[in-house]
Amino acid sequence: MLSGFQSDLSSISSEIQTLQQQSVSMSLRLKNRQAVRSQLSQLVDELVVPSIMISVILDSTVTEQDFLEQLHELNNKINFAKELSFRETLACADIQDIVDRLKIKAVSKIREFILQKIYSFRKPMTNYQIPQNTLLKYRFFYQFLLANERTVAKEIRDEYVDTMSKIYYSYFKSYSGRLLKVQYEDVADKDDLMGVEDTLFLDHRAGFFSKPSLKSRNTIFTLGQRGAVLSPAELEGPILIPHAAQRGDCRYPYETLFRSQHYALLDNGCREFLFLSDFFMVAGNSALDLFNSVMGKTLSMFLKNMSTYVSDCYDSIAVFLCIHIILRFKAITAKRNVPALDRYWEAVLEMLWPRFELILEMNIQSIRNTDPQKLGVLDTRPHYITRRYAEFCSAIVSINQTFPNERTNALLGQLQIEVENFVLRMAAEFPSRRDQLIFLINNYDMMLGVLMERASDDSKEVEGFQQLLLARTQEFIEEILAPPFGGMISFVKESEALMEKGQLDKLKNDEVRITQLVRGFSSTWKQSVEALSQDVMRSFTNFKNGTSIIQGALTQLIQYYHGFHKILSQPTFRSLAARSELINLHHLMVEVKKHKPNF
């Protein structure tokens, strides 16, 4: 028995060893199988095409959420199958056929859906933004086509470009055409220049005397309400509806139509660019190229129309307003981060700037060539040519302040020099210096008044005319004080010069002259001041300006009389009897104040 036990025990220990070895090898196999299983099950999951996918892709409509989800799945399987075929996995061949057939089915359904949406744009009166928004919801469809069927993707893109290009072209062509029907019929022509005389001229067609071609030539140089087109409310306001305007018999200046047309372009252009970038997944230059293939035809038509208009336009304010509309629209597209229209804006500005400069140069030339003798009756009131200039200059300066431009400032500077020369040439026609000064002051004052309504006080035009007005006013005051008080004034100036040199004694023997001056002033100054006030108020068209000239003249008179007092209080003249007849200075000031005109 014992020896039997012994042999059994020794065999147990060897069995335990064997079991241990078996257990180790089993756990290793399990580990390996688990590792393989996780990878293999993923592979099988990716490979297997579930029946639900097949049924949804074949039977569901493309707009259903399920279809979109299964399409994403199918896309992943197609990509996975491609990956496996590179690794030459044999299992891949089993599913390749099914995946390909599903892909073909999905592509044909998507193609049909997108093309149908594109064709729906073509129906008349369609708001194409609605189908565009629908397409954006399904932008993955195009991504799927681009990845799996390039030719279909290109077909869809070409069809879209062709359709939209025609839609935009026909819409803008008819809109532009209808807008022109509500433009003012009276437009400026090449004879409507600043320096053209306002006389009647013979109208050969009618065979009798008629007024100049434009109903009122002044309106060409006046801004009036036209500047409102640049206010934010109007600039980005609703576009004009031509048939409604025709029904209401409304007419508009060119810049209002231009704003409406270009705001429609800006709005549609921005929306189109963002749609193309989003749906067709393009960016940078390829986005700009795609945009140009859609909008190119329309933009070329716009430029052609602009070129026709500009070549025959003589309304500088309209052209300048159009330039500023474009500058503002350029800023809006930059703010919306849409570079698509930048080249178009530049092209329009390259057309408008030279035309504006040309019209301005024609006006400068017309003023340079004006012959004062042909301008009819001489009149000291403000001249109509200077009024035109003032209106025009204030219009351009007030618009230019918002987007300052050096080219404009230089041209306005030239125009100002010509107008100043013209005013001097006109003034030279008057025989007396007094009339010349009245003419100059009236014109400078009127120009300053008009300019200050619109331009800022520190603009160089305003400063220039202020200096001219001040200098001429000072000269005029001396001119009107000379007839009644010239004797006293020249005596004061003469004495002051001698006093500086210390030679006042030279005038010691002028007692008779001094006595005459003292008595003459005392007896006539009141009537002289009265006559002077009335004369000034008659001479100047601007009541306020006349008033300030009278005040200036009276102040100057008191200063001269004060100087007269001072000279007669010198030791040389202390013994003069006539000194007792001098009017008290304070009394004179009180009396003079009564003559100051009141508003």
Image (tube, rainbow, N blue to C red):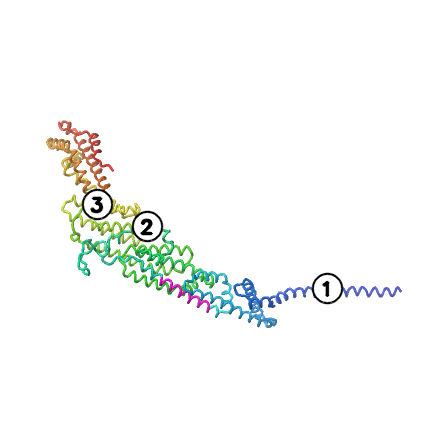
What residue do we see at 81% from left, 64% from top? 12
Neighbourhood count class around disc 3 (C-alpha, 10 Å): few under 14, some 14–19, many 20 upward: many
Q: Secondary structure at mark 1?
A: helix
Q: Nearer the viewer, residue 230 or 261?
A: 261
Characterize the local packing of mark 2: few (<14), some (14-19) or many (20 or more) Cα atoms within 10 angstroms. Answer: few
* Vertical relation: 340 (above or below) 484: below
- Relative to residue 566, is residue 416 depicted above or below? below
| Residue at mark 2 | 401
Q: Is residue 410 left or right of residue 511?
A: right
What range is drawn magenta here? 155-174
Quarter containing the N terminus:
bottom right
Q: Are marks 3 and 2 in contact (CB under 8 Å)?
A: no
Q: Give yes or no for residue 474 being in the magenta stretch.
A: no
Q: Which mark is residue 24?
A: 1
Q: Secondary structure at mark 3?
A: helix
Q: Name the kind of residue labelled 3 in the image.
A: Asn
- Contact, mark 1 vs mark 3 (Cβ under 8 Å): no
Which residue is tagged 3? 442
Please state, as top left, top right, bottom left or bottom right, where the C terminus lies in the image.
top left
Q: Earlier in the sequence, mark 3 or mark 2?
A: 2
